[in-house]
Image: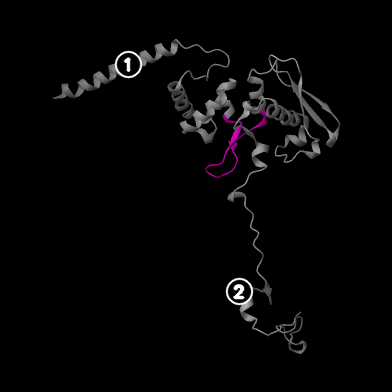
Amino acid sequence: MTQPAQLPTAIEQALEKTDRQTRRTELAQISFEPGQMFQPKNSRDLMDMASMISGAGFMLKDIYRNNPAACLGLIAVCAPYGLNPLQVSWKTYKASKAEDAPIAYEAQVIVAMVNGSGALKGGLRYKFEGEGQARRCCAYGTLKGDTEVLEAWSPRLDQIKPKNSPLWTSDPDQQLCYYTGRSWARRYKPEMLLGVYSTDEVDGPLVGPEVARDVTPSAPRRGGVIYEQEEVVDEIHEGEVLTPGDDTPDADERQPGED
């Protein structure tokens, strides 16, 4: 009776060993070139990669952990630029606590996408003019196949809002480069950054119930007590006029020290 029970287990172990060996043989045939490690070759490869990355634990930012679908989206964003999704995950965050809040990307990622796109000769370059709050930055570069140098200037430092990063104070030139590099791509190669927004872009025009402000007028006060508006109206009968002294005691009825 014991032998039949052990037979399926032995077969399963043999099959599992064969599957492992086959998988190792397949993996040995895959070679990685710089920037090609996270380049899925087909849909199945993409799904397998997303599933694997989602289980990376502390190597992956928490919003992607155990979420293969989110990892699939991250890989799809990174793949055209040869970026490592594990690294990029730490440069992203949800724009708010809302469940459907968009993902915001640090400007550093966006400039990396521009330089990694292969659309430019070399990469973006920068120059500055002005000092202090009047400082401006120019990002410039030349598209492959062209000879014209394309420029994008930032506004003056004091005209840029919002400034969500502390680097705007400690290292404004670096932030100006990020800001202007993004502007350059939006102007000359908008297809690079479709659906990719930086922290400033998401935090600025964000609208929705989670950021709504209560503008209801405060209820009126009488005698130190807050009344709802309809209660005040009910107490005022037709033809009745209330003067400031009608609901206050006479001077001789007030207690010492009472206003």
Q: 105 or 90: nearer the eye?
A: 105
Residue bearing the label numbered 1: 17
Residue 128: image x %, image y %? 82, 27
Give above or below for 244 relative to 202.
below
Q: Residue at x 70, y 39 (%)?
A: 164
In the image, what residue type sits under mark 2?
A: Glu
Query: For the residues carrying marks 1 and 2, which lies nearer the camera in this image?
Result: 2
| Three-letter residue code for mark 1 | Lys
- The quadrant holding residue 238 is bottom right
* Residue 56, label in figure: none
Mark 1 residue crowding within 10 angstroms, few (<14) / some (14–19) / many (20+): few
Residue 162 figure quarter: top right
Q: Residues within 10 Å of mark 2 (few under 14, many from 20)?
A: few
The x and y percentages for residue 146 are 72, 15
Q: Residue at x 77, y 36 (%)?
A: 169
Quadrant holding the N terminus: top left
Check disc 2 and report the residue beneath it. Answer: 230
* Number of marks in the rendered image: 2
Residue furthest bottom as drawn: 252
Q: Residue at x 63, y 20 (%)?
A: 117
Residue 142 locus on image (x, y percent): 73, 18
**Secondary structure of residue under mark 2:** helix
Query: In the rendered view, how is the structure colored?
Result: one colour
Question: Is residue 100 within the magenta segment?
Answer: yes
Q: Quadrant of residue 192?
A: top right
- Residue 125's place in the image compared with 197, above or below, is above
Across and down, in percent, residue 253 comes to 73, 88
Q: Which residues are magenta?
A: 89-108
State yes or no: residue 51 in magenta: no
- Of helix, strand and loop, which one carries label 1? helix
Mark 1 and mark 2: span between their CA atoms?
Answer: 79 Å
